Image (spheres, rainbow, N blue to C red):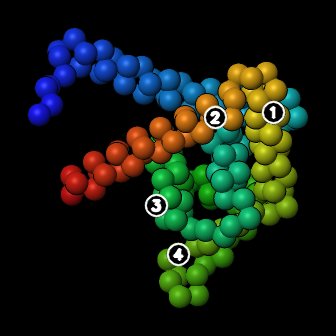
Amino acid sequence: MHSPIGQGARQDYVGRYLDALALVERLHRLLLDVIKDEFERVGVFEINAVQALLLFNIGDNEVTAGELKSRGYYQGSNVSYNLKKLVDLGYMHHQRSEIDRRSVRVRLTDKGHGIRDVVAGLFDRHAEGLRARSILPHEALEDINAALKRVERYWSDQIRYIY
């Protein structure tokens, strides 16, 4: 039989968990700032970092707003608004589904691929810098990804069990 975690150990765990949550949130905001800074450096001013990440994550795929939401992207942002803006600015093509006229499929234009390439280049440089300086060795990156996937699975299960 396992003994319950002592109150001090439990509070320590909760504190570390809250620190991790705050760090993930800060990293996401910092990622958006890094993308914004890169865009300013290369002279891209008409889209924001959230829209750039949207283009990066769509890549060579053709998707609907619903598919982006169901994949877990962009829960906190208005996906439909961002997709419409990206279409209006010429970064994406859109086409109504022949089967369901309410559904619109989108894909990147050449201009959208150009933005995706800027973001991909930024990420490549960062990955190489982290690796070359041994800031985040390969094994540590694997450990972080595995731990974050376990948290993602746990949170997803919590949402499913609520309903």
Task: Relative to 99, say whether 161 is above or below.
Answer: above
At 83% from the left and 49% from the top, the residue drawn is 117
Of labels 1 and 4, earlier in sequence is: 4
Comparing 115 with 71, the one in front is 71
Amino acid type, label 4: Ser
Compare marks 4 and 3 and give the one earlier in the sequence.
3
Q: Position of residue 73 (x, y in %)?
A: 52, 51
Say which quadrant the C terminus sits in. Answer: bottom left
Q: CA distance from mark 1 to mark 2?
A: 15 Å
Query: Do callouts 4 and 2 mark residues in contact (Cβ within 8 Å)?
Result: no
Real-space Cα separation, disc 4 to disc 2, in angstroms: 42 Å
Quick one: which residue is furthest to the front in this view?
1
Disc 3: which residue: 70
Residue located at (52% from left, 48% from top):
74
Front label number (3 vs 1): 1
Binning the other alpha carbons within 10 Å of mark 2 as few (below 14), some (14 to 19) or many (20 upward) gives: few
Q: For the residues labelled 1 and 4, say whether their Cβ atoms are less than 8 Å apart.
A: no
- Dot 1 surroundings within 10 Å: few (below 14), some, or many (20 or more)? few
Circle 1 SS class: helix
Q: Earlier in the sequence, mark 1 or mark 2?
A: 1
Comparing 101 with 4, the one in front is 4
- Residue mark closest to the camera, 4 vs 3: 3
Image quarter in which the N terminus is found: top left
User: Which residue is under mark 4?
Assistant: 103
Q: Residue at x 81, y 33 (%)?
A: 128
Please identify, in this view, whether the residue under mark 4 or under mark 2 is nearer the observer.
2
Figure quadrant of residue 9: top left
Reading the image, the residue beneath label 2 is: 139
Q: Nearer the viewer, residue 72 or 2?
A: 2
Q: Is residue 110 left or right of residue 149?
A: right
Q: Residue furthest bottom?
A: 99
**CA separation in Å, label 3 and label 1:** 31 Å
